[in-house]
Amino acid sequence: MPEDRHWTPVPRPAGRRPRLRPARRRLLLMGPGLALAAVAPGLAQPRYPARPVQLVVPWAAGGGTDAVARMIASLLERDLGQPFVVVNRTGGAGVVGHAATATARPDGHTIGMLTLEIAMLHWIGLTELTPRSYTPIALMNQDPAGVLVNASSPYEDVAGLAKALQAAPPRRFKGSGSGRGGSWHLAFVGWLRTLGLGADHVLWVPVEGASLGMQELAAGGVDLAACSLPEGKAMIDARRVRPLAVMAPERIGAFAEVPTLKEALGVDYAAGLWRGIAGPPGLPEEVRQVLGAALARVARAEEFTAFMAARGFGTSFADAAGFAAFMDRSDAAMGQALRDVGLAKG
């Protein structure tokens, strides 16, 4: 009969129980966990990521956020050696997907893309989630709002338009680009405030999406519009609308001829969409560091910058601390803009 691996019999008088050799007896008394450590003291936990990672996107497949997320996921997969799978969790104006990230198990194998809406939704009572409901990892993208007019507009630059707005009676001008309280409406309201004008000084014509706002502008149904220049690109290229300025700290590479508000008016105001990567609360520091370093490499990668530039998306990287501060500023700005238009709760 083969020798038992856990104990070895030794000679004994008849009627007595077998005795274990001292070394084997000590291993058994230590318990299975400590015994394993004694046998293999160099054994360590698997390096993160240990299995495929889900990247939750709160918007539908095929949109701009989805496209950016899929490019980031493919580059993370190549860098970190595990699949990064984009999962579109739509619904509730972005609440469903943002909630899926916030409530995920904090082991780094479910992370999410946060968008501007997380700085807006709690102000209008749709969720209790705020930017501080997450572990921020990195800001990856900003698409600033642009100010656009019809190609036949008499206003050749944003300074001329601003003077006309300030001289006109309330609601003389009409604008569009999103629904009332949408991201582009709020960006526009913030710009009006820098001109000393009220939130309703321009009559806002609500539409379901920037593409319809561009159609309204091209058809002459409104006098001006606010949306990202990538969203207006088709109408710009067709010479049916004309961009006058961008609400950004710097010019956009794909639209380098369009000045910023600061350049044109001396107004230090920036607003627009943004996208960043975050995890649930309690994400281990080691995981955050691994992901943060990998996302920094993604942001510098020629493949990523070329992809973003080709589609007119802005690139704007910030590390975890920078992203947290950025979201705090965005949250405060969105709260003020929503109060200005009477949509903030409480």
Image (tube, rainbow, N blue to C red):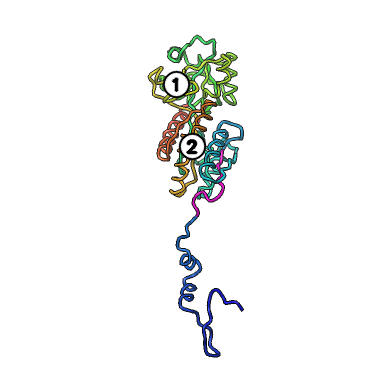
Q: Could you say where residue 294 lies in the image, as x and y percent from the top left?
A: 47, 41
Labels 2 & 1 near each other (Cβ < 8 A) = no
Q: Could you say where residue 269 lies in the image, as x and y percent from the top left?
A: 41, 25
Residue tagged 1: 192
Amino acid type, mark 1: Leu
Q: Could you say where residue 339 lies in the image, as x and y percent from the top left?
A: 46, 30
SS assignment at label 1: helix
With 30 as the anchor, is 1 left or right in this view? right
Residue tagged 2: 298
**Number of other residues with Cα within 10 Å of mark 1, as a class: few under 14, some 14 to 19, many 20 or more:** some
Give the magenta-colored segment's residue range: 46-57
Closer-to-camera residue (121/63): 63
Q: In which quarter of the image is the N terminus?
A: bottom right
SS assignment at label 2: helix
**Number of other residues with Cα within 10 Å of mark 2, as a class: few under 14, some 14 to 19, many 20 or more:** many
Closer-to-camera residue (40/148): 40
**The quadrant where residue 233 appears:** top right
Identify the residue at horizontal 45%, vertical 60% (top origin): 42
Q: Could you say where residue 15 lies in the image, as x and y percent from the top left?
A: 55, 90
Taking the image as drawn, is residue 341 in sight?
Answer: no
Q: What residue occupies the far left of the structure in this picture? A: 266
Amino acid type, mark 2: Val
- Asked if residue 50 is among those painted magenta in the image, a careful observer would answer yes
Closer-to-camera residue (110/36): 36
Taking the image as drawn, is residue 36 in sight?
Answer: yes
Is 188 placed above or below 43 here? above
With 150 as the anchor, is 316 left or right in this view? left
Identify the residue at horizontal 52%, vertical 87% (top origin): 12
- Asked if residue 262 is among those painted magenta in the image, a careful observer would answer no
With 112 as the anchor, is 293 left or right in this view? left
